[in-house]
Amino acid sequence: MAGPGDNTTPKGQNERHIPVLLEEVIAALQPATGQLIIDGTFGAGGYTRRILETGASVTAIDRDPSAIEAGRALERALAGRLTLVQGTFSTLDQVALLGGVPDGIVLDIGVSSMQIDEAERGFSFQKDGPLDMRMSSSGPSAADVVNRLKTGDLARIFNFLGEERHAGRIARMIEKRRASEPFTRTRDLANAIEALVGRNPKVPIHPATRVFQALRIFVNDELGELVRALHAAERVLQPGGRLVVVTFHSLEDRIVKRFFSDRSGTGGGSRHLPQLEQRLASFTPIGKGIVSPTAAEAERNPRARSAKLRAGIRTHNPPLAEDHSIYGLPNLPIFHETARS
């Protein structure tokens, strides 16, 4: 679909990225001329371009400096209707102070297809690259985590964030191997995991897939970022504003489901909050439950197969007190530069 500024898109970028649930996002978000929308995950600009077509203005955030740089030409071409901000979407309430109170916020959770495709970013073992996985290209890398965290901490990360049933065995293998040769490349780690647990020809996914997922989520604190972003959206959206969230696996979707359930009063609220406060819902759900891709979209774009959309409308009530215990997040280690096994 042609959109504003398509001729400013870097060659090949649109071909590598197909926005997931695009029309469903727009239907839930309902952007219009004169509105301000925050796109919390700019990526290749798929949602942003479609929102701009409606006449709305967009403030788009991305923690990846390369994504922001790639979008600068589009930003210049839109003459003030698009503002790009490098940062995490958990700070979107601070970003909103720069551009005004938003009428809508959209969050597309997880790693972008562009990052996966770039071997040097280290998100995938399909192409060999450095064991990096940092969306912001700063801070501790996946190699730092693998080579320096305690074995028990690695096992907990693999178990909870990757739902890996061989978490303990893999963590112990890593501890033994890194003593003589640290892990620095994606395929080296993937091959070591495959050699340890084997590969069932009847199972299509590689045996290292869940460990790589866990490392990516941990390195980028993706679940913590999501929780903070949801509460930031609650604080900054004006009454009638819409929050639309697209997730790609069960850990993310569970957080979003519990947030909307708690904030709409349909989930019983938190046991730590007074009953009166629980009744003052800060969101009204849009639709019933989740929106999933059609069979046609899933066939056209394999990345969309696991996508789930949930959305809500901000009420006139004040933000509720935050209680992160409702999300069931694990007590995972905090990485320190001096971390050692």
Image: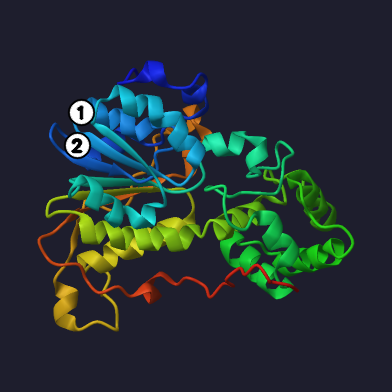
Q: Which residue is drawn at 66% across and 44% down?
A: 122
Q: Identify residue type, mark 1.
A: Thr
Please state which of residues 238 and 109 is positioned toward the viewer in this rendering. 238
Q: Which mark is residue 165?
A: none
Q: Identify residue type, mark 2.
A: Pro
Proximity of marks 1 and 2: CB atoms separated by less than 8 Å: yes
Q: Name the residue under label 1.
A: 54
Q: Which mark is residue 31?
A: 2
Badge 1: residue crowd in 10 Å (few <14, some 14–19, many ≥20): some
In the image, taking residue 16 as reference, residue 30 lies left or right, namely left
Please state which of residues 246 and 227 is positioned toward the viewer in this rendering. 227
The N terminus sits in image quarter: top left
Seen in the picture, residue 97 relative to 304 is either above or below; the reply is below
Residue 280, image x, y percentages: 14, 71
Residue 306, image x, y percentages: 48, 45
| Inter-mark Cα distance, 1 to 2 | 6 Å
Question: Could you say whether the residue bearing mark 2 is in a helix, strand or loop?
Answer: loop
The C terminus sits in image quarter: bottom right
Q: Residue at x 72, y 51 (%)?
A: 207
Residue 329, image x, y percentages: 47, 70
